[in-house]
Amino acid sequence: MSHIELEAKVKLLKSNIKTLKRELTLAQKASFVDKVQILSLEAKVRELEANEDLSSKEYTTIEYMEKGIESSDSIYKQELDIQSSERLKLMEKNRSLRDQLVLKKEPRGTSHNEVDTLPPPMNNLLQPSTL
């Protein structure tokens, strides 16, 4: 091979080396961009997992709060039922005592069907009545 041919081959090889170096640099840059994207995606995945855990905990907390409210509501309703029942019992007892009092006050031989006083209004049951 002649000197000119060798120089041409050397130039061609140098050109190929430059091309390969550029391709390597581009591949490294692309690889770096890919790594950055991968790291970014991994960070997003961790963030979403943390949010999912937080959302799950918040959901559980809300469920417990709702159950507590339902339980409290049930207790209040039971208490209202008990108080209403007690009120009715007191009203019946009051009526019975009034009837007995009227019977004791009536002179013998008068009708037991007429009563001179009216019972107090329902909202005054807690106040002492005047007979």
Image (cartoon, rainbow, N blue to C red):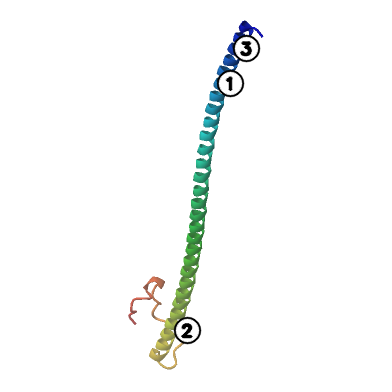
Q: At x 59% / y 13%, what residue is drawn? A: 10
**Front in this rendered view, residue 87 or 83:** 83
Q: Which amino acid type is marked by label 2?
A: Asn
Q: Is residue 114 visible?
A: no
Query: Where is residue 117 drawn, in percent x and y?
Result: 38, 79
Q: Secondary structure at mark 1?
A: helix
Q: Residue furthest right?
A: 1
Pair 3/1: label in front = 3
**Numbered label attached to residue 20:** 1
Q: At x 44% / y 89%, what residue is drawn? A: 110
Estimate how packed mark 3 is, as few (under 14), some (14 to 19) or many (20 or more) residues with alpha carbons within 10 Å: few
In this rendering, the answer to whether 69 lies above or below 1 is below
Q: Which residue is mark 2?
A: 113
Quarter of the picture holding the C terminus: bottom left
Q: Which sits earlier in the primary sequence, circle 3 or circle 1?
A: 3
What's the CA distance linking mark 2 and mark 1? Answer: 121 Å
Query: Where is residue 80 drawn, in percent x and y?
Result: 46, 71
Q: Which residue is mark 3?
A: 9
Q: Residue furthest front?
A: 2
Q: Secondary structure at mark 2?
A: loop
In this rendering, the answer to whether 39 lies above or below 50 is above
Pair 3/2: label in front = 3
In this rendering, the answer to whether 103 lies above or below 92 is below
In this rendering, the answer to whether 121 lies above or below 92 is above
